[in-house]
Image (tube, coloured by chain):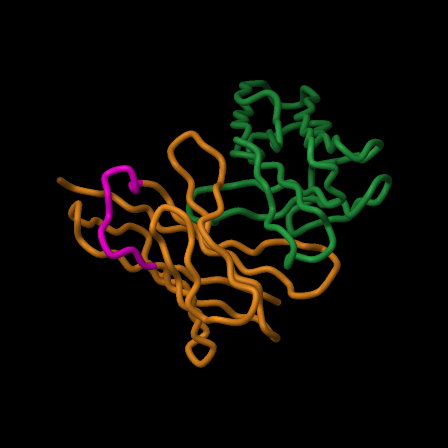
Chain colours: A orange, B green
Amino acid sequence: AQSVTQPDIHITVSEGASLELRCNYSYGATPYLFWYVQSPGQGLQLLLKYFSGDTLVQGIKGFEAEFKRSQSSFNLRKPSVHWSDAAEYFCAVGPSNFGNEKLTFGTGTRLTIIP
Amino acid sequence: EAQVTQNPRYLITVTGKKLTVTCSQNMNHEYMSWYRQDPGLGLRQIYYSMNVEVTDKGDVPEGYKVSRKEKRNFPLILESPSPNQTSLYFCASSPGTGLSNQPQHFGDGTRLSIL
């Protein structure tokens, strides 16, 4: 069964500082990996996704993530955070085959930005 | 505009009073799914549908029903709601040809409180 672990429940970062959110997954084959962001009172917005190919993927809002098969990780990074990045971030893994396209989510990391 | 629309956005009701949360998508997607989001648990899948008249259980289906009579609509039905179904609910859709095409689109969520 697929699973996702986000070890950090809450992270606080100063505006302008760099950010890395950790994500580890468990899946029997090559997974499809996603990062979603949820702003307060909003639904989930896709930041980026990895299916295959280049292990460094670029997303919206200046985010990027790197797939590391050897570490079963898909960490999210941003070189310089903005106050508007304060939100909850979810890593998710999906099956790489047709069928129930269920996304298995991590428990989320809440990001707080301080001035 | 491509979107997944859920109604209502907020609902407070009492134990045992049947309720329906509607979900509609305008992207002609085949795959639709319901998730619930609870603090510390991330999002968990309730039911999914791979096409009209095809539905199946997700990870936490107890106490819920769904139907898929039309491609665009996928209502979530709570026949006899109980307080443990108090949660934030999300509907999602995707083309259904495998996650490599497009990610799932999420609605803005429905916050249910069962007293």
Q: Quadrant of residue B35?
A: top right
Q: How many marks?
A: 0
Q: Quick one: which residue is furthest to the bottom in this view?
A: A70
Q: Position of residue A55 (x, y in %)?
A: 45, 71
Residue at image point 67% right, 45% down? B94
Residue at image point 84% right, 32% down? B69
Residue at image point 80% right, 35% down? B71
Q: Position of residue B56 (x, y in %)?
A: 77, 48
Residue at image point 51% right, 41% down? B37
Left or right for A18, reference B14: left
Left or right for B18, reference A36: right
Q: Position of residue B49 (x, y in %)?
A: 76, 44
- Based on the picture, tell me whether residue A81 belongs to the magenta stretch: yes
Magenta-drawn segment:
A77-86
Q: Looking at the picture, does residue A32 appear above or below residue B51?
A: below
Q: Position of residue A54 (x, y in %)?
A: 48, 71
Give the position of the N terminus of chain B as an image quadrant.
top right
Q: Quadrant of residue A100?
A: bottom right
Q: Quick one: which residue is furthest to the left in this view?
A: A115
Q: Looking at the picture, does residue B12 appear above or below residue B60?
A: above
- Based on the picture, tell me whether residue A40 belongs to the magenta stretch: no
Left or right for B34, reference B50: left
Near-viewer residue (B66 or B17): B66
